[in-house]
Image: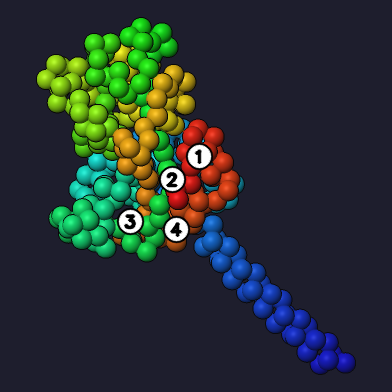
Amino acid sequence: MKKTIAFLLAVMMLFALAACGNDKAQAEVEAAEAEEITLYVFAAASMTETLDQIIELYKAEAPNVTIVPTYDSSGTLKTQIEEGAECDLFISAAQKQMNQLDAAVDAEGGNTDGLDFVLSDSRVNLLENKVVLAVPDENKANIQSFEDLGTDKLTLLCIGNEDVPVGAYSEEILTTLGILDTLKASNKLTYGSNVKEVTTQVKEGTVDAGIIYATDAFSADLTVVAQADSALCRQVIYPAAVMKNTQHEEAARDFLAFLQSDAAMQVFQSVGFAPAP
């Protein structure tokens, strides 16, 4: 009888040890799954308000992931990436800056320096925006259309620098209207280093009008008097892609997928973005 009891106790101890081992292994798996991850996201300045909201939403989806956003002009962000800045995900306000970093794009497509920073299979067209003409609340100059920018109504117009997507779109519009050189020659142009700076100048009334994105006009509660159509300006598409130097590719891809979800798109659409066609 004593031998039987001893045998049973030994068996029970083995089961207990095995269970402890399984519990420890499971705990280790769960700890690995909950590893704290920081993702650095570079995004066009026009996404500031919406992306901040989406980052808050994402905390419920991935509580172990901290998203650190950097907002600026796409040209500035592209240069920082090229110079070695830590960036897991890049969202540009134009194809140009993404193309310049993507080895899958040839020189004719814009990658003239053969740069290779983009995980090309992750690249997606995320959003579409619109370019608009916004005026201060009082609109003392009575600017009502893009065509008015070529008249005596205008004293000063603010646009983005030419290396900023909104600036490139603005120059395209003014060139199409045949008034860009005239405005430059008559010193009727002032510039912002990104779309937020242009928006601020309009909001403060230091200029008669500014060419910005519809989303920024909405967020700043500005009066929009005209929207550029395809006859004036090419389509405004925001591409997004995971960067090759990321240390957290899976997490970066997961966040990019979340940006395309219905929950994120509702936030984007609330200020005037649309899903990219």
Quote the CA–CA distance across marks 3 and 2: 18 Å
Q: Amino acid at mark 1?
A: Phe
Q: Return the residue at label 3.
A: 243
Which label's residue is closer to the chain start, 1 or 2?
2
Total number of numbered discs in the rendering: 4
Q: Return the residue at label 1.
A: 268
Please state the horizontal and vertical placement of residue 206, each as a whole percent of the image.
30, 12
Frontmost residue, 238 versus 78: 238
Residue 253 is labelled as 4
Q: Return the residue at label 2.
A: 127
Q: Is residue 182 left or right of residue 263?
A: left
Quote the CA–CA distance across marks 1 and 2: 8 Å
Q: Is mark 4 in CB contact (under 8 Å) with mark 3? A: no
Element under disc 3:
loop
Quote the CA–CA distance across marks 4 and 2: 17 Å
- The local crowd at label 3, few if under 14, some if 14 to 19, many if 20 or more residues have their Cα within 10 Å, is many
Q: Residue at x 36, y 32 (%)?
A: 228
Element under disc 4:
helix
Quote the CA–CA distance across marks 1 and 4: 19 Å
Image-quadrant location for residue 160: top left
The reply to whether residue 28 is visible in this rendering is yes
